[in-house]
């Protein structure tokens, strides 16, 4: 069986990561920090094990903050265009969470869970997605 390889890149294309295999989990997060980071009503991300990372290239900047749960989250973004391409978190052991939009693939698997739904705008509903919090 051939393993899928996917490349994710920032808007300007300078910061890239390539991953092999299927994501461990695809989710939506409606916390206020994710809304501010994306400029939207949610973040749509995919968790991959660290071992799935085949390659990374480009200059990266990182910003660490305390998340709503109290643990740290570190966003990796392009210093040129500001796109958050991936993030790591205290709660994510040996894994990264990649911004799904950076794959530029409309057929990418949809989220299977939504986090911080108490912060979700009342007009937004994701078909077939379970509320995880």
Image: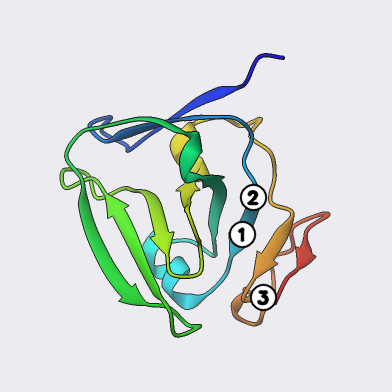
- Residue 12: image quadrant is top left
Inter-mark Cα distance, 3 to 1 = 9 Å
- The secondary element bearing badge 3 is classed as helix
User: Looking at the image, which is closer to me, 105 or 4?
Assistant: 4
Q: Return the residue at label 2.
A: 26
How far from the left and from the top, in percent, is residue 109? 69, 39
Q: Residue at x 33, y 63 (%)?
A: 74
| Quadrant housing residue 42 | bottom right
Frontmost of labels 1 and 2 is 2
| Residue sitting at x 64%, y 46% | 24
Image marks 3 and 1: residues in contact by CB distance under 8 Å: no
Q: Percent x, y for residue 107?
A: 66, 30
Q: CA distance from mark 1 to mark 2?
A: 7 Å
The single residue placed furthest to the right in the displayed view is 128
Residue of label 3? 117
Answer left or right for 84 relative to 108.
Answer: left
Assign a secondary structure to mark 1. Answer: strand
The residue under the point 26% across, 36% down is 15
| Residue found 51% across the figure and 26% down from its top | 6
Left or right of 76? Residue 112 is right
Label 2 crowding class (10 Å Cα cut-off): few <14, some 14-19, many 20+?
Answer: many
The quarter holding residue 14 reads top left
Question: SS at mark 2?
Answer: strand
Report the disc number at residue 28. Answer: 1
**Which circle's residue, 3 or 1, is located before the other in the chain?**
1
Q: Position of residue 101 (x, y in %)?
A: 49, 41
Quadrant that contains the N terminus: top right
> Residue 58 bears which disc, if any?
none
Residue 45 lies left or right of residue 126; in this view the side is: left
Q: Judge by depth and name the residue closer to the eye, 106 or 9.
A: 9
Sequence order check, earlier mark of 3 and 2: 2
């Amino acid at each position: 069986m051939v393993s899928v390889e996917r490349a994710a890149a920032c808007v300007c294309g300078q910061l890239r990561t390539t991953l092999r295999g299927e994501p461990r989990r695809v989710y939506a997060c409606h916390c206020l920090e994710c809304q501010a980071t994306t400029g939207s009503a949610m973040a749509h991300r995919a968790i991959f094990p660290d071992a799935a990372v085949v390659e990374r290239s480009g200059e990266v900047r990182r910003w660490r903050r305390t998340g709503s749960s109290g643990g740290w989250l570190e966003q990796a973004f392009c210093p040129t265009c500001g796109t958050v391409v991936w993030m790591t978190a205290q709660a994510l052991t040996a894994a990264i969470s990649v911004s799904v939009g950076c794959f530029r693939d409309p057929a990418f698997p949809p989220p299977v869970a939504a986090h911080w739904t108490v912060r979700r705008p009342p007009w937004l509903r994701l078909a077939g997605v379970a509320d995880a919090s």
